[in-house]
Amino acid sequence: MAKEVMRRTASDNEYLHKDFHGSMSVGIDYLDAHYGPEAVRDYLRQFTASYFAPLIERVKMEGLTPLKEHFERLYAVEGAAIEARLSRDELVIRVAACPAVTHMRACGYPVARLFSETTRTVNEALCEGTPYAAELIEYDEDTGRSVQRFFRRAS
Amino acid sequence: MISCTDFIPAYSELFKFLEQKGGQEAVHDFWNYLSDRFLTNLRDLVAEHGIRGCWLYWSHTLNEEAADFTMELDEEAGEFSITMHQCPSKGRLLACSHLEPYHDYCGHCAILYKRVLEPLGYEYAIDLSEVDRAACRVVVRKAGKG
């Protein structure tokens, strides 16, 4: 049997490993089972505050436009069509099917009981310290279809 | 939703969160859990194809992760190796200037795969001495061939 060699550089492929959604789901499931549902939310808040700090700063300075651009980019990378409607003080995102849930269902991976928190809690945390708030108006557990709303807090 | 392209920082932050909760033991417990729950495809491929199963598994994952690597398979010698010239995961963490990577981020690779491969009769060795520049080397051998 001949020796086989595969050599690749980063530019040979697009960076898109959707199985990471399955690993995320296992992580959510683990936190839920071992530390409880509030630990899931605490973790997602901590992650969002750290990783998305530059985006949150832009929302403070520029309003909802950076959030709209963020979601358009995020879902486009995953190959999912969304409808994003922005008015002066409100942004409504309609997602026909969550690409993470779609991938996990297609591969037969279990979807964590609290997987929707990766949308609800992350969106709420994106608004922390800004004049805005977030609510998950609709979420379908089977497909991840959702309606996500961001709006100016009542002062 | 957290995009799969944002997963690596989310993963690193999860390790930090778990360490705050229960120390390094909590992090290792999660890695064992993840290995048992999620690496069934590696387990199945190696159980069916022998050491070629490693080649099949990492051919898929490393290409999707756009890694810079050299992978070698010598079935006669019972050896498989990955020389990771630039790990996309660690590379992304190092490039993220506003985020400090989990101090033992690359430790998950040592635990996750060893836990799958050793019970199947393979030795799994990983050299993490150059992870500060996102490089490492993995060697899998049929036990008793080294």
Image: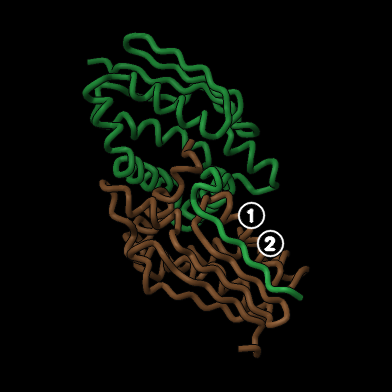
Q: Percent position (x, y) of residue B77? A: 68, 83
Relative to A32, residue A79 above or below: above
Q: Position of residue A39 (x, y in %)?
A: 40, 49
Q: Which residue is mark 2?
A: B56
Q: Residue at x 27, y 15 (%)?
A: A154
* Residue for point 68% across, 73% down: A3
How crowded is the residue under tag 1: few (<14 C-alpha within 10 Å), some, or many (20+)? Answer: few
Answer yes or no: is residue A51 visible: yes
Is disc 2 in the same subunit as disc 1? Answer: yes
Badges 2 and 1: C-beta atoms under 8 Å apart?
yes
Q: Position of residue A40 (x, y in %)?
A: 43, 47
Residue B49 lies left or right of residue A116; in this view the side is: right
Chain coloured green in the rendered structure: A
In the rendered image, which quarter contains the C terminus of chain B? bottom right
Residue name at image x 36 percent, y 53 percent: B93
What kind of element bears circle 2? helix
Q: Chain of mark 2?
A: B
* Quarter residue B24 falls in: bottom left
Give the percent coordinates (x, y) of residue A106: 70, 41
Residue drawn 41% across the image and 48% down it: B10
- Say which amino acid is labelled 1: His
Amino acid at circle 2: Leu
Distance Cα–Cα, label 2 vs label 1: 7 Å
Instruction: Say which residue label 1 marks.
Output: B60
Which color scheme does this rendered protein use? by chain
The brown-coloured chain is labelled B
